[in-house]
Amino acid sequence: MKIREGDLMKGIATITGFALAGSVLLAGPSLAAGLACGKLGNLATPSAVADIDARLPKGFALEQSDQLAAAITLLREHGLSSGNTIDHLIAFYCPAVAAEAGLSDAEKRARVMRFAQKATRLVYAQNDVDAVIYDVPLKPGVAEAATERARKEGLTLEAWIGQMVEAAIR
C-alpha cells in the first residue's frame, strides 16, 4: 500500500491523550515505502496563513522550542485550529527529515513522530495557561522503564512523571 499524496496529514491518532495528526507515518504495510511527507498545498490553509508561510520557520529550525512556539502562535493567531496547526507544523518539518541521507526510514519516521508529539503537546498546552510543559529527552531504557511504571500505576507517562517531579520537590 502506498500513501497517497495528501493523505499523510489526514490521519489522526490519540497519543498521550492528544490528537496527533501524522499518525499515518506508521501505517501498516506502508512502512516499507519509506517516509512520505504531506504537501502544504493539500492542507486546508486559509489565505491569511498562506501569506505568512514564508515567514514561518521550516525544517530542523522547528526543533528549537522558541521557533516552534513562535510558529504555533503565528498559525493560531491566523485562525488555524489545533489540528490544522499541527498538520502545518508537520508539513514544515517532515521534508527536512525525509532528506536526511544518514537515517533509515524507521529512524526518519521516529524522528517525525517525536516532533509531532512535541508539537501536539505545545499546541494543546497553549489552551491551558496553568500548565508548563517540559520536553526532556530520556535514554530508551529509562523511557521504557518509566512507561512501564506508569502503566503499572494506571497512569499516563506524563501524569506519572508529573507525580514524580512533584514528589521530588516536596
Image: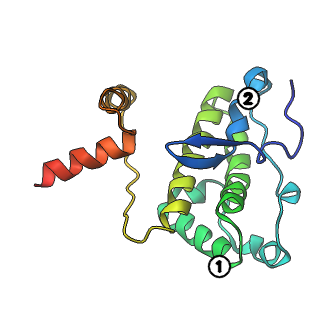
* Residue sticking out furthest to the front: 154
* Mark number, residue 77: 1
Q: Nearer the viewer, residue 90 or 17?
A: 17
Q: Is residue 23 left or right of residue 143?
A: right
The residue tagged with tag 1: helix, strand or loop? helix
Q: Earlier in the sequence, mark 2 or mark 1?
A: 2
For the C terminus, which image quadrant? Answer: bottom left
Whether residue 104 is visible, yes or no, is no
**Residue at mark 2 to residue at mark 1: CA–CA distance:** 32 Å
Which residue is rendered at x = 75% and y = 76% of the image? Answer: 52
Disc 2 secondary structure class: loop
How far from the left and from the top, in percent, is residue 163?
25, 47
Q: Is residue 102 above or below residue 31?
A: below
Residue assigned mark 2: 27
Report the side of 8 relative to 144 (left or right). right
Q: How is the image coloured?
A: rainbow
Q: What's the residue type where badge 1 is placed? A: Glu
In this picture, is 145 found above or below 67? above
